[in-house]
């Protein structure tokens, strides 16, 4: 009996939540039944080549390590895949960078509400000294491309 | 009444020539337009150079809490005590925009005659540095809050620095952004300590177009901006405390040719150093190019001890900041009287017109008013506004005394300010206040004492022993003798004592 009652409650809750979800912001069904634009047949995607300078630049910027040629191939395939977006004609359409763009940006009053948690913050750090975080000195630049030993070395 | 002369607008007529061997002797570089006598004769065959200087000024917003978090803004505090979880970039934290920072930026934009963008966007600027825990800074690169403004500033030129020239510099944009933390280096032990108290404090970045042509103009423009910010209250703009930081972009070219490669000079923390750093960099570039070298598009730091700029270690090569829209912040919408929505919480609305109506009088307006109201010279009103508190003191004295303001100004600037400068004091620290000075000037005006006696009294007052001017006059018997018979007797005595001369 408990299970029955529980089940009914659960189902009621879900359908209430569910119908709210389906209604959404536009108040109707989300999927447009008559799209203006159709995907063309699968054409072979153009190959994308990544140069050494670009790889070096990326490794410096994002501090990633491509490790071997497989990593580079994966990068090239990813670029190829993303390039499909160019198929869509976006002329005269403003780019959207967030689904939040019509939301109100909340403005907070200028009051002091946080801080004074030095101990808590420092306990996460591996190296501290008298309430300061300790960091390695400056930015240690990656050695130049020619001087590096382990650039794309492990190719198996 | 002399009006300030309008200067050359955008094009700077100042031409530069290299001074032979002057760069490392510490002497001032020669600017041809000002001091033709100092140009080295040997260089007369070379075409003149023109320098362009653009500035990026970061002003810390005067607010109680930071721009995206609720931690306190304060200059001195125990390390890492004014840091919230968001400032430390702990996962799961989100930015919440501080209303006061928006108002400060709008005020500043209006004061600089900018167009305020009713919709502005936030972006992330990525770079790695230990004092930037998130690895990115939230700024406004695509669409800043204010654009296309103008800043008028005054230069004192001429032999006695008495002629005032008005110049303009265009303001490209004003954007809101976050400050980074502070890193303290102990090079001896290869240690770097990070204090995040400053991380997340609101900044207004004011970008000025390259309309300036030398260090003096750059310093004058920044000084005027500083006065405007202090008048508005949007920033206290104290350079010594790092509340106003300036980066200068400097390049040189021959008149008629395209602009040269520019370098960026950072680490300038006073107006005087700004002028020196810019002038040094201009000279350095001229020397380099005349010797057949090239200028690298690099970032340099100003070493104030040596008085020169040196390349910065960490900034080699072009930085790619990989700007992307800040996904956690929707666009910032501002309203004016017309577009104000009906039922919305007051707290959530920033009304540009409301702020415009409440803008205080800007320094330029105050200067004109002082000249018109008191009949003083423009350069005097410039000095009054240049010293914090001096204008108020002057107006107080004028109110309390019968002396003509045109005479009062002489006493305030030559005598009082002269003494303050001699003892390196601010107006607030002055041992002589407006009431004492007014009393003194009244005695002078009524003919009780002479001008030289008044100066003596001022010296006594400066000791700060609490005596009134009248007391000092009586003590030192400085009164002018009014009695005719007494005067006759004295003259008679003098003549009798010097029979030979007669």
Image (cartoon, rainbow, N blue to C red):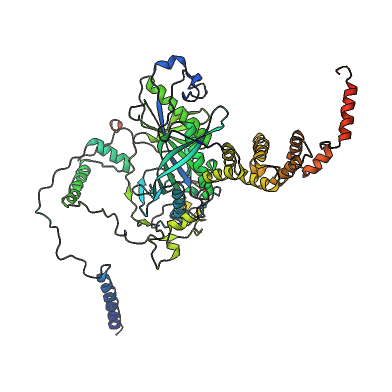
Residue B107 point in image, percent of width and height:
46, 51
Q: Is residue A1 left or right of residue B405?
A: left
Residue B360 point in image, percent of width and height:
52, 51
Residue B116 point in image, percent of width and height:
39, 51
Determine which quarter of the picture holds residue B347: bottom left
Q: Is residue A143 left or right of residue B71?
A: left
Q: Is residue A54 left or right of residue B44?
A: left
A146 or B235: nearer the viewer:
B235
Q: Is residue B444 left or right of residue B1?
A: right
Residue B191 point in image, percent of width and height:
48, 39
Residue B102 lies, with reference to residue B155, above or below; the image says below
Residue B346 lies, with reference to residue B457, above or below; the image says below
Visible residue check, residue B179 = no
Residue B174 lies, with reference to residue B51, above or below; the image says below
Residue sitting farthest toward the top:
B42
Determine which quarter of the picture holds residue B255: top left
Residue located at (58% from left, 42% from top): B371
């Amino acid at each position: 009996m408990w299970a029955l009652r529980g089940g009914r409650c659960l189902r009621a809750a879900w359908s209430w939540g569910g119908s709210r979800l389906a209604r959404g912001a536009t108040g109707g069904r989300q999927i447009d039944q008559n799209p203006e634009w159709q995907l063309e047949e699968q054409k072979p995607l153009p190959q994308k080549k990544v140069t050494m300078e670009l790889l070096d630049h990326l490794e410096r910027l994002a501090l990633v390590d491509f490790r071997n040629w497989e990593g580079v191939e994966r990068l090239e395939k990813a670029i190829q895949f993303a390039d499909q977006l160019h198929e869509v004609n976006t002329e005269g359409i403003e780019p959207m960078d967030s689904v939040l763009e019509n939301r109100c940006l909340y403005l907070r009053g200028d009051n002091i509400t946080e801080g004074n948690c030095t101990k808590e913050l420092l306990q996460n750090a591996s190296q501290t000294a008298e309430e300061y975080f300790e960091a390695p000195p400056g930015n240690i630049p990656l050695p130049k491309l020619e001087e590096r030993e382990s650039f794309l070395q492990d190719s198996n | 009444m002399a009006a300030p002369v309008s200067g050359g607008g955008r094009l700077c007529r100042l031409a530069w020539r290299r001074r032979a061997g002057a760069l490392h002797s510490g002497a001032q570089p020669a600017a041809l337009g000002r001091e033709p006598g100092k140009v080295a004769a040997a260089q007369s065959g070379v075409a003149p150079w023109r320098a362009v200087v653009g500035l990026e000024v970061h002003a810390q917003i005067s607010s109680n809490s930071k721009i995206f978090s609720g931690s306190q803004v304060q200059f001195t505090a125990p390390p890492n005590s004014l840091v919230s979880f968001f400032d430390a970039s702990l996962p799961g934290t989100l930015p919440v925009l501080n209303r006061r920072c928006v108002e400060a930026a709008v005020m500043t934009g209006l004061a600089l005659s900018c167009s305020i963008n009713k919709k502005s966007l936030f972006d992330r600027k990525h770079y790695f540095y230990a004092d930037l825990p998130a690895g990115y800074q939230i700024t406004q690169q695509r669409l800043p809050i204010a654009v296309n403004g103008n800043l008028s500033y005054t230069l004192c030129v001429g032999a006695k620095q008495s002629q005032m020239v008005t110049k303009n510099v265009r303001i490209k944009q004003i954007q809101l952004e976050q400050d980074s933390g502070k890193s303290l280096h102990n090079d001896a032990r290869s240690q770097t300590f990070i204090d995040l108290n400053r991380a997340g404090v609101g900044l207004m970045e004011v970008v000025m177009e390259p309309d300036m042509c030398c260090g003096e103009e750059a310093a004058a423009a920044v000084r005027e901006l500083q006065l405007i910010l202090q008048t508005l209250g949007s920033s206290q703009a104290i350079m010594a405390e790092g509340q106003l930081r300036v980066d200068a972009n400097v390049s040189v070219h021959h008149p008629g040719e395209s602009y040269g490669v520019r370098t960026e000079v950072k680490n300038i923390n006073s107006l005087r150093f700004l002028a020196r750093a810019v002038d040094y960099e201009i000279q350095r570039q001229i020397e380099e190019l005349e010797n057949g070298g090239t200028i690298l598009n690099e970032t340099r730091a100003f070493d104030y001890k040596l008085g020169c700029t040196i390349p910065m270690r960490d900034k080699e090569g072009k930085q790619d900041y990989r700007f992307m829209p800040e996904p956690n912040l929707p666009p910032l919408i501002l309203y004016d009287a017309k577009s104000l929505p009906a039922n919305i919480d007051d707290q959530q609305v920033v009304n540009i017109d409301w702020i415009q109506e409440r803008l205080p009088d800007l320094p330029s307006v105050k200067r004109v008013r002082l000249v018109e109201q008191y009949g003083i010279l423009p350069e005097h009103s410039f000095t009054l506004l240049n010293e914090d508190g001096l204008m108020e003191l002057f107006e107080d004295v004028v109110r309390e005394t019968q002396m003509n303001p045109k005479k009062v100004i002489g006493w305030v600037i030559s005598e009082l300010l002269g003494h303050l400068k001699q003892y390196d004091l601010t107006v607030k620290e002055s041992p002589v206040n407006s009431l004492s000075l007014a009393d003194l000037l009244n005695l002078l005006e009524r003919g009780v004492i002479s001008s030289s006696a008044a100066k003596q009294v001022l010296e006594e007052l400066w000791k700060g022993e609490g005596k009134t001017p009248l007391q000092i006059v009586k003590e030192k018997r400085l009164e002018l003798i009014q009695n005719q018979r007494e005067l006759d007797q004295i003259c008679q005595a003098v003549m009798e004592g010097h029979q030979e001369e007669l």
